[in-house]
Amino acid sequence: MGIFKNFLLKQAMKSKLKGVPEAEQEKMLGLIEKNPDFFKKIGDEVQKRVKNGQSEMAATMVVMREHQAELQKLLK
């Protein structure tokens, strides 16, 4: 991932994950860097649900539950 893109991703994460310890933010960023296509797919699905009228939080929860098995594999 390019340096500029990486910087923007970190800034976006910090704004969305206020209150989450920085070590956890770095862990999540590492997962995203290793699996960008997977996380892009999740983001696209969340945005599609938001456009259809769901709140961002509700859409995120539904999509994360749908991909729970894949996420658990990545976290191990």
Image (cartoon, grey):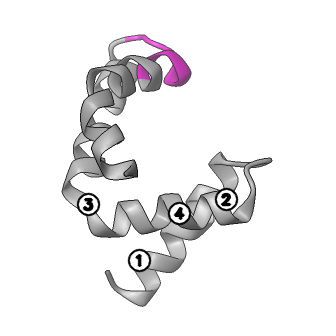
Q: Nearer the viewer, mark 4 or mark 2?
A: 4
Q: Nearer the viewer, mark 3 or mark 4?
A: 4
Q: Nearer the viewer, mark 3 or mark 1?
A: 3
Q: Nearer the viewer, mark 4 or mark 1?
A: 4
State the residue position of label 1.
5
Between residues 13 and 66, which one lies in front from this camera angle?
A: 66
Magenta stretch holds residue 58: yes
| Distance between the alpha carbons at the discs numbered 2 and 3 | 19 Å
Amino acid on which the number 2 mark rests in the picture: Lys
Which structural element holds mark 1?
A: helix
State the residue position of label 4.
27
Between residues 49 and 19, which one lies in front from this camera angle?
A: 19
| Distance between the alpha carbons at the discs numbered 1 and 2 | 14 Å
Amino acid on which the number 3 mark rests in the picture: Asn
Instruction: Check if mark 4's residue and mark 2's residue have beta carbons within 8 Å.
Output: no
- Could you say which disc has been placed on residue 35 in the image? 3
Could you tell which of marks 1 and 2 lies nearer the N-terminus? 1
Where's the N terminus, which quadrant?
bottom left
Q: Residues within 10 Å of mark 3 (few under 14, many from 20)?
A: few
Which range of residues does the magenta coloring cover? Answer: 53-59
State the residue position of label 2.
14
Which structural element holds mark 3?
A: loop
Residue 56 in the image, given as x and y percentages of width and height: 51, 24
